[in-house]
Amino acid sequence: MSAPVLPWPVEALRAQLAPLLPGVRVEVAAEIDSTNSELMRRARAGDDAPTLLVAETQTAGRGRLGRVWQRSGAQPGGALAFSIGLPLAPRDWSGLSLAVGVAVAEGLHDEIGLKWPNDLWWRGRKLAGILVETAGAGAASAPRYVVIGIGINIAPVAGEGFSTPPCWLDELLPGIDAPGVLSRVAAPLVRTVRAFEQQGFAPLAARFAARDVLAGQVVRLSDGGEGVARGVGPGGELQVQTDGGLRSVHSAEVSVRPVPAGGAPRGAA
Ligand code: BTN
């Protein structure tokens, strides 16, 4: 098993996160299948300790809707791939992935937009994605273990066949590296998730709206619907003005593609 090669600020991260997540573990893997899969496996085996797990290489990174996350196998530091797992007990889970997107975008750059439900975009290209999963089914009010996985392109992304053309953070923040990005986003992310646990998505809605790249765009849904995106509701649901009226899209199973004026869908996913 090889050792990590990048200078991860493990102790500084632990010090930042411990007041928000007492007992938090901060771990770096040189290589793993998927940081989300690993924390989900641990949770299913009864380990629900708050954990930040970062991987220099993922061999089976996962995206939303069962997709492969494209940076699997990329060189260490080409992307930042990490997951935070913690027990969480919000009254309503709706909008959690939007809240995560707000925290990460705000931690990175003013120009970064959010594409519902959980992609970070810059100038029409995808910069980062978020995969939120939960383990444990108890009483509705009991905490569940949530695993929040985030993948951010840092260096140029090679390859073809992306559903959305990618961009990378080095274009926006030249010289930034994966450990530096993690230091910028980890604590704001946990703070926002804690605020979400107390107050839900509604207090974050204006911050999402300020970065909403779909607002006012014609969008096509993977279930065949089409209309004009009209922002998100208080629970993070996408509002789409269709011929049949205003439709609220809640389902994480729906993907949304902006339709450029007079053209075919641009291929967002
Ligand atoms: C998406 O764009 O559909 C979501 C991508 C999420 C990728 C991250 S990388 C860290 C964590 N581990 C995974 O296997 N997936 C998430």
Image (cartoon, rainbow, N blue to C red):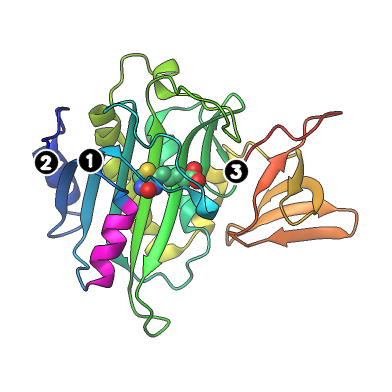
Image spot of residue 28 (x, y percent): 17, 42
Q: CA distance from mark 3 to mark 1?
A: 37 Å
- Secondary structure at badge 2 equals loop
Compared to residue 231, the image places residue 48 above or below, namely below
The answer to which image quadrant residue 114 occupies is top right
Residue ID for mark 1: 31
| Residue beneath the point at 60% across and 60% down | 234
Foreground pick, 72 / 189: 72
Q: Does the residue at mark 1 contact the one at mark 2 (Cβ under 8 Å)?
A: yes
Mark 2 or mark 1, which is nearer the start of the sequence?
Answer: 2
Q: How many marks?
A: 3
Tell me the tag on residue 209.
3
Mark 3 or mark 2, which is nearer the start of the sequence?
Answer: 2
Left/right of residue 163 with respect to residue 106 in the rendered view: right
Q: Quadrant of the C terminus?
A: top right
Mark 1 or mark 3, which is nearer the start of the sequence?
Answer: 1
- Secondary structure at badge 1 equals strand
Q: Residues within 10 Å of mark 3 (few under 14, many from 20)?
A: some
Residue stretch in magenta: 36-45
